[in-house]
Image (cartoon, rainbow, N blue to C red):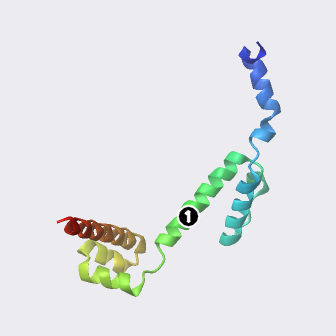
Amino acid sequence: SKLDNFEYCASIIKSHKDVISKPSEKQVEFAKKLAEEKGIELDSEILSDKNKLSKWIDKVLKEKKKEQLNRPLTEKQVQVIQKYGDDKVKKALEKGDFATCRKWLDKFFKKGKTRKKRSRKS
């Protein structure tokens, strides 16, 4: 059959490449929303290519997550680190490395929850 012929299949794919590589409406809407939030312009070349747009979205989301991790800590978070933190996290706090502080806080509170669960069982 024609489908067993590589050249034939490749020609079909090539003739539909614009449809295959075109991003979905939702993908474009999401990218435009991200661009607006970040205050950046989205290149039309990126907007017209599904793979390029996907990579762009991933990059922007990664940057956004990094920014969120590095936002200032609350007063209570600072107090917990000052009271229970080791030297490493206290130095990170002094340097303003809030991402490291947040990771430490996440681990600290996860440990606390597992201790509470265990103590209830006994």
119 and 20: which is toward the camera: 119
Query: Height in image: 72 above or below 6?
Result: below
User: Left or right of 4: which side holds 62?
Assistant: left
Quarter in which the C terminus is drawn: bottom left
User: What is the number of callouts on the image?
Assistant: 1
User: Left or right of 23: which side holds 82?
Assistant: left
Outermost residue toward the top in this view: 1
Outermost residue toward the right in this view: 15
Residue type at mark 1: give it: Glu
Q: Position of residue 69 (x, y in %)?
A: 47, 70
User: Left or right of 57: which side holds 90?
Assistant: left
37 and 118: which is toward the camera: 118
Residue at screen point 83% across, 31% down: 15
Which residue position holds label 1?
63
> Does the image show residue 76?
yes
Residue at screen point 41% across, 75% down: 98
Secondary structure under the numbered disc 1 in the rendered image: helix
Query: Height in image: 54 above or below 99?
Result: above
Query: Height in image: 52 above or below 101?
Result: above
Quarter in which the N terminus is drawn: top right
> Does the image show residue 39?
no
Q: Position of residue 37 (x, y in %)?
A: 67, 71
Q: Quadrant of residue 76?
A: bottom left
Residue at screen point 30% across, 79% down: 81
Outermost residue toward the left in this view: 122
Q: Position of residue 35 (x, y in %)?
A: 69, 66
Q: Please tell me how crowded label 1 is: few (under 14), some (14-19), or many (20+) other residues with Cα within 10 Å.
A: few
Q: Position of residue 43 (x, y in %)?
A: 75, 58
Residue at screen point 75% across, 22% down: 9
